[in-house]
Amino acid sequence: MTNRAYRLLVGVVLLTGLYFELPILIYGLIGLTIFEGITNWRLPIIVNWITGRNQETLTEGSLGLGFKQRIPFDAERAWRLVLGSVLFIVYVLYYDHLWFLAWFMGFAIFGAGLSGVCPLFIGLKWAGFR
């Protein structure tokens, strides 16, 4: 499983949970992304380890651009922490006022999974994450 397929899956799960009003699905997604960000036990790595493939590359999702690494922290890991934190703030704490942001995130992540271009990930790479 690639990180691109993972983003597509996360976008589909988030949009499905929002559309059908399934808060348990979104709470699970928040918990999963924060757990993955803290422990670095990521679903794509685990699936690749079980299937015996090694498909992770550091340039995946960054359009092949070279970025200077100033922070010794994976951008994928930071992406998961940012995603989980923002979803927690938007969906759990302030959903009445910021409901549109959860939908925007769902469509943006779904689009990142389809196209392979994630603006947040590129921004994190540009900021200096590994």
Image: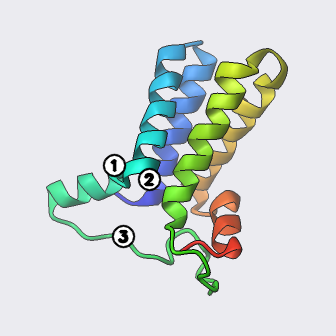
Residue 99, percent across and down?
A: 77, 23
Residue 108 appears in the figure: yes
Viewer-nearest of discs 3 and 2: 3
Residue 106 appears in the figure: no
| Mark positioned earlier in the residue sequence (1 or 2) | 2
Q: Tag 2: residue type?
A: Ala
Query: Which element is circle 1 on?
Result: helix
Residue annotated with mark 2: 5
Query: Which element is circle 2 on?
Result: helix
Mark 1 is surrounded, within 10 Å at the Cα level, by few (under 14), some (14 to 19) or many (20 or more) other residues, namely: some
Q: Depth check: 23 or 73 in front?
A: 73
Instruction: Give me the C-alpha separation between circle 3 and circle 2.
Output: 12 Å
Q: Tag 3: residue type?
A: Glu
Q: Tag 1: residue type?
A: Leu
Q: Quadrant of residue 44?
A: bottom left
Disc 3 vs disc 2: Cβ atoms closer than 8 Å? no
Residue annotated with mark 1: 43
Disc ID at residue 56:
3
**Residue occupying the point 47% across, 21% down:** 25
Instruction: Give me the C-alpha separation between circle 1 and circle 3.
Output: 12 Å
